[in-house]
Image (tube, rainbow, N blue to C red):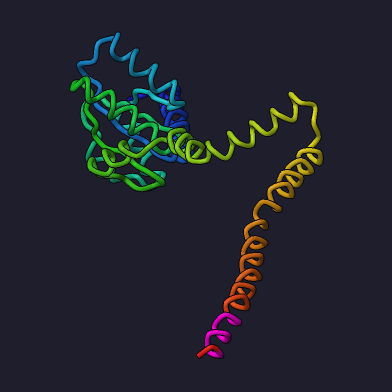
């Protein structure tokens, strides 16, 4: 029978895992057996770079914690060696890092996972892993806004380099617009001149026709 000290240590472990599960947006449970020390270290490094917490845990302790937070459905996956990857910051990161690593190393097996307090199927974990990360989405959004931002950056740089103030640039733009306006108005003036010339030609031809009539 475990001593009181051992029981207290287990209770403390379970309490710690409960807090981890409550704070996590997502978690992925894996079977890591067969991984070499080097492979395990490489996996841990990738997870750490993605701010994902990863640790090995006994199935009995994880099950106790899971039941406390409503994830008792994880019990079906809790057999054999178990490690769990969780993140409280990025809902995609645990699934993406684990799935990407498993593609190149079939020794790592995804057993189950959860998201926002609900257990996920393996297909749902794969779908989540294929979702762009938050950083990728931000990069795409910034890329779509790149042109107007670049234009603004060039304008601001011109102000800095040329020592000009914004009101001066506005005045210059207004001056350029005014200089272009007369050129655009020139066409209507020519049309009016052409219209005035037409009646004069008609008046010149009219008397000639009348003289011809008299002569007849």
Check the image and report above or below for 53 versus 140.
above
Taking the view exactly as shown, the residue that stands out farthest to the top is 38
Q: Is residue 145 left or right of residue 74?
A: right
> In the image, residue 5 lies at what x, y percent?
45, 22
Q: Quarter-wise, where is residue 35 in the image?
A: top left
- The residue at the point 24 percent across, 31 percent down is 110
Give coordinates of residue 77: x percent, y percent.
23, 37
Q: Which residue: 52% across, 40% down?
A: 145
Residue sitting farthest toward the front? 215
For the image, the number of numbered tags is 0
Above or below, 169 against 188 in this view is above
User: Seen in the image, is 5 located left or right of residue 182?
Assistant: left
Q: Nearer the viewer, residue 45 or 171?
A: 171
Q: Main secondary structure of the magenta part?
A: helix
Q: Is residue 200 above or below residue 77?
A: below
**Place of residue 47 in the rendered image (x, y in percent of width and height, measured from the top left):** 39, 23
Residue 214 lies, with reference to residue 129, above or below; the image says below
Name the foreground residue: 185 vs 123: 185
Q: Nearer the viewer, residue 144 or 54?
A: 144
From the image, which quarter does the N terminus lie in?
Answer: top left
| In the foreground, 201 or 136 | 201
The quarter holding residue 44 reads: top left
Asked if residue 63 lies in the magenta stretch, the reply is no
Image check: 74 left or right of 106?
A: right
Q: Please give the range of residues in magenta.
A: 206-214
Instruction: Identify the residue at image location x=37%, y=31%.
Output: 94
């Amino acid at each position: 029978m475990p001593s009181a000290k051992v029981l207290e240590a287990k209770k403390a472990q379970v309490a710690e895992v409960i807090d981890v599960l409550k704070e996590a947006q997502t978690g992925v449970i894996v079977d890591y057996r067969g991984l070499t020390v080097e492979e395990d270290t490489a996996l841990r490094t990738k997870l750490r770079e993605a701010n994902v917490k990863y640790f090995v845990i006994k199935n009995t302790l994880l099950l106790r914690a899971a039941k406390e937070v409503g994830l008792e459905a994880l019990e079906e996956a809790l057999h054999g060696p178990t490690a769990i990857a969780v993140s409280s910051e990025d809902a995609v990161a645990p699934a993406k890092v684990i799935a990407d690593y498993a593609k190149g190393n079939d020794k790592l097996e995804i057993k189950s996972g959860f998201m926002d307090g609900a257990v996920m199927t393996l297909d749902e974990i794969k779908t989540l892993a294929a979702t762009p990360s938050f950083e990728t989405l931000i990069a795409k959004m910034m890329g779509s806004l790149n042109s107007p931002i670049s234009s603004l950056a060039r304008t601001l740089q011109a102000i800095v380099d040329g020592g000009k103030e914004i009101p001066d640039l506005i005045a210059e733009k207004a001056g350029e617009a005014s200089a272009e306006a007369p050129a655009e108005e020139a066409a209507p003036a020519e049309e009016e001149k052409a219209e005035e010339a037409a009646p004069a030609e008609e008046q010149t031809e009219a008397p000639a026709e009348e003289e011809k009539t008299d002569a007849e």
